Image: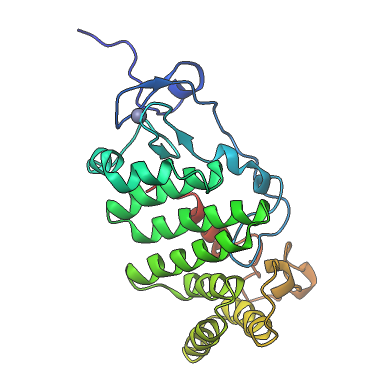
Amino acid sequence: MASSSSSTGSKSGQAAGPVRCAVCGGESRQPPFRPNPPEQPPDLDLRPGEPLRSTMARWLQQCPHCAYAAPDIARAHPAAAEAVAAGPFRALVAETSYPPLARRFLAWAHVLEETGALHAAAEATLHAAWVADDLNRPDLAAEWRRDAVALWRGGPNLDAEQTVRVIDALRRAQAWEDAAVTAEALTATQPSSHVAQVLALESRLVAAKDSGRHTLASALPPTFPRPHVAQQRVGRPAPQAGQGGGLRGWLRKLFRRG
Ligand SMILES: [Zn+2]
């Protein structure tokens, strides 16, 4: 009767024993993942810098029995099992024209979308695009960035920081007109200074039809990655770019579990 250990995936229970899938109940070994924080600045879409950047194969667990994928497969939304059993999910995880790691992120994105977490689904879809970037598949990367934008726009209203990421996804997918119009609309709202700096860079890149990867450091050169102590003045809050709430908050959102 008394269960001495429950595999809820919480705390230390995950490291040693098998993980029990919250969707099908099947057990599997999942290596623990304790990421080191990035030392390099993130891309404009907040893809983290190294060393975290190269660890995408470890970001999600995937059940070898039912293919449910999640940061922690011992946990699942009550509606996840139905989504995993349904035709679209089965077709997705069997889609051999997609790289396996990208399929894993898309599988998680599909469950998130089916359970109503559209912004988290957008995030996971963007992660699939990053996998496509690494595998030099610009066709898939552009397709999944457009999908991510649709999911972001299908969810609740986006704040200014997330809207910049939508603009970046549109730019990387070469959706120039949509990127330009979205950037103009955000500029008109007079966003905060660090958003405005990134937005200014995005607008320049869109005008130049530059769909390449750029880092936040190129948008925020004076204060990233470390605040300039010399620029601090008595009576003003210390500059926080690189260390502070905004960027760190964005990174937290990256790994927020659905
Ligand atoms: Zn399973």
Q: Quarter for ligand 1?
A: top left
Query: Quadrant location of the N terminus?
Result: top left
> Furthest residue to the right?
230
Give percent across and percent down for residue 70: 42, 40
Question: Foreground: 240 or 252?
Answer: 252
Rendered view: 36 above or below 255: above
Rendered view: 125 above or below 246: above
- Residue at x 72% of width, y 67% of height: 217
Q: Is residue 232 visible?
A: no
- Residue at x 74% of width, y 72% of height: 218
- Residue at x 53% of width, y 86% of height: 177
Give percent across and percent down for residue 62: 45, 34
Question: Foreground: 96 or 5?
Answer: 96
> Furthest residue to the left?
1
Question: Foreground: 221 or 226?
Answer: 221
Rendered view: 190 above or below 148: below
